[in-house]
Image (cartoon, rainbow, N blue to C red):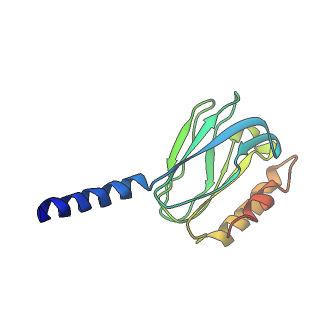
């Protein structure tokens, strides 16, 4: 009976570890709470090992990484295709809709501790020079990183 109890404990522990990884959905929208051409939510905080799924709810959107922490893989999706990204490294990830970058269709993901926050702030400031409108979007989103 003791062997069975130990097996049950180990199995339950393993299942809890698998169940702890979450999936967060980010919608690609023509209109959202922050205006036109947005990701919603545009700032998310997740844990290492979680997944972010980008969903094109309106046509003509894509998603591509701009900046990822050291050791993480960048990504680039296709127009009108969902993209799923596993967050493997702690830090700040910046991303864009390449089709609507001039409209500041960008977002921020924080995974655990913001290990590369200074790099993310610098990159966002430089990248914002491409925006024709909504020039403060990156500033608003990065201000939420803690």
Instruction: Please identify the residue farthest to the top as the structure is shown.
Output: 59
Residue 93, percent from left and from top: 61, 58
- Viewer can see residue 46: yes
Q: Is residue 8 above or below residue 61?
A: below
Q: Residue at x 49, y 54 (%)?
A: 50
**Left or right side of 116 for 87:** left
The number of discs equals 0
Residue shown at the point (52%, 42%) measured from the top left: 84
In the image, taking residue 113 as reference, residue 7 lies left or right, namely left
Which part of the image, by quadrant, shows the N terminus? bottom left
Image position of 28 with respect to 22: above or below: above
Whether 139 is drawn above or below 26: the answer is below
Residue under the image location 49 percent in, 63 percent down:
89
Residue 76 vertical position relative to residue 81 in the rendered view, above or below? below
Q: Position of residue 77 (x, y in %)?
A: 57, 38
Is residue 126 visible to us here? Answer: no
Residue farthest toward the front in the current orientation of the protein: 1
Looking at the picture, how far across and down is residue 104, in whole percent? 79, 47
Quarter of the image where one finds residue 129: bottom right
The quarter of the picture where the C terminus appears is bottom right
- Residue under the point 61% across and 45% down: 64
Q: On the rendered structure, is 8 left or right of 74? A: left
Residue 12, percent from left and from top = 30, 57
Residue projecting furthest to the right: 133
């Amino acid at each position: 009976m003791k062997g069975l109890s130990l097996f049950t404990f180990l199995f339950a522990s393993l299942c809890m570890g698998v169940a702890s990884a979450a999936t967060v959905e980010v919608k690609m929208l023509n209109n959202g709470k922050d205006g036109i051409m947005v990701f919603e939510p545009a700032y998310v905080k997740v844990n290492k090992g979680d997944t972010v799924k980008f969903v094109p709810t309106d046509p003509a959107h894509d998603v591509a990484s701009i900046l990822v922490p050291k050791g993480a893989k960048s990504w680039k999706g296709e127009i009108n295709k969902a993209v799923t990204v596993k967050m493997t490294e702690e830090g700040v990830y910046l991303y864009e809709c390449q089709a609507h970058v001039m409209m500041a269709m960008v977002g921020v993901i924080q995974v655990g501790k913001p290990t590369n926050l200074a790099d993310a702030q610098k990159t966002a400031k430089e990248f914002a020079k491409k925006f024709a409108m909504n020039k403060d979007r990156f500033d608003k989103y990065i201000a939420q990183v803690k």
